[in-house]
Image: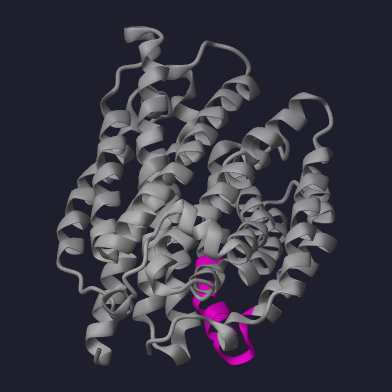
Amino acid sequence: MDRAARLKAIVGGSTGNLVEWFDWYCYSAFALYFAPHFFPAGDRTTQLLNTAAVFAVGFVMRPVGAWIMGVYADRHGRKAGLTLSVTLMCAGSAAIALVPGRETIGVAAPVVLVLARLVQGLSVGGEYGASATYLSEMAGRNRRGFFSAFQYVTLIAGQLLALCVLIGLQSVMPESTLEAWGWRIPFAVGALLAILVFRIRRGLAETESFARADAKPSGFAALLRHHPRAFATVMLLTAGGTLAFYAYSIYMQKFLVVTGGFDREVASRINAGTLFVFMLLQPLGGALSDRVGRRPLMIGFGVAGVLGTYPVFVALEGVRDPWAAAALVMAALVAVTGYTSINAVVKAELFPAHIRALGVALPYALANALFGGTAEYVALWFKGAGWERGFYWYVTAMIAVSLVTYLRIRDTRDHGLIAED
């Protein structure tokens, strides 16, 4: 492909990824406002625990989506997988925007909420593998780290956009209105944007890697039988990285409120500001990996995470200045960049083309369901049990597991399986 066509495909794939993750993260961003509509009245921690449980339930569906749509994308093309995933996300967001609250339809309200999150989980499970594979295959060999990093740029941008919508609504709406019905707006917007993305993705070019892929079966049995080492490697390198990402981005907004003592608006602004800088760091990390390799960045994250996670969380317990809190969160996210900026390309480079979408998606989704999706719930469980710092040690331990993996694998920049340039 010429450079213009390659850039058009990367921009098109990235834009769709942004909308997918905006829809996904609206749930977390607005949980503080819609929780009372779906769960019985009680203290704030209990209601948040219920919403975190539903958030985790959505992750249960991600491995299923990764399996089904990973095979689909390997057999029918990356473009077909991307189009199907955004269709499912549209349906889930529309359902959350429209479902009446518990006070109107009783127990059916949380049931619909769970079903909508399951559909969204199915979508995101397939989205990650398809988009990571698509961007990695579309990028040229010498800039593969840089361009594939936009997978996480748009992932973070989706989360950041959800937070910006929250901040905007907080600025123009009274809190009572936002709690009553304003929280529905972002889910409705997400559903409409997904329709637009569907049209964009229908016009994307297919990758050369898929066109040249061997006619070999893509499926769970084939993945485990022929690529067990790569499967295990993806799960282990993901475990600590995804847990750290969710601890310092998704859970951090609530941590600053329920533990740090900040009000919701200030916590949202701290979260949005640090995520914006974090987003800008991703291409820099990807470009650096093109020069020095993927492995040094992952090892840097592992070492910093093991040594710094507990001290950062303890410091955040007592800080009262928003700028100091933002600096601490930012320091942690700089370290996490060593994982997030290159995790997509590392996984894609571990598998041959005929099974790459499934190989990227399924073990990642399993690790995400076990460690990323449960991060909020585990953190709040430790807090409810009276030993909040147990969560800090848990994050540290899982980063240490991933660090061992980073030390043992070969650098995929030099030994990757993406043959096309």
Q: Is residue 112 left or right of residue 403?
A: left
Residues in magenta, as a range:
278-294
- Rendered-image quadrant of the C terminus: bottom left
Residue 273 visible (yes or no): no
Label tally: 0
Q: Which quadrant of the figure has residue 353?
A: bottom left
Point 43% across, 67% down: residue: 356
Residue 21 rendering spot, x and y as whole percentages: 40, 52
Task: Name the dominant secondary structure of the magenta segment.
Answer: helix
Residue 125 rendering spot, x and y as whole percentages: 42, 49
39 versus 405 height, above or below: above
Q: Does the magenta segment cover residue 153?
A: no
Q: Does the magenta segment cover residue 288?
A: yes
Point 70% across, 80% down: residue: 296
- Rendered-image quadrant of the N terminus: bottom left
Residue 320 rendering spot, x and y as whole percentages: 74, 46
92 versus 124 height, above or below: above
Q: Which quadrant of the figure has residue 189?
A: top left
Give whichever of 2, 50 is nearer the camera: 2
Give whichever of 135, 68 is nearer the camera: 68
Give whichever of 313, 364 is nearer the camera: 364
Colouring chosen for the image of the structure: one colour
Point 61% across, 55% down: residue: 242
339 versus 183 height, above or below: below
Point 34% across, 67% down: residue: 14
Residue 378 visible (yes or no): yes
Residue 142 rendering spot, x and y as whole percentages: 46, 92
Q: Which quadrant of the figure has residue 183?
A: top left
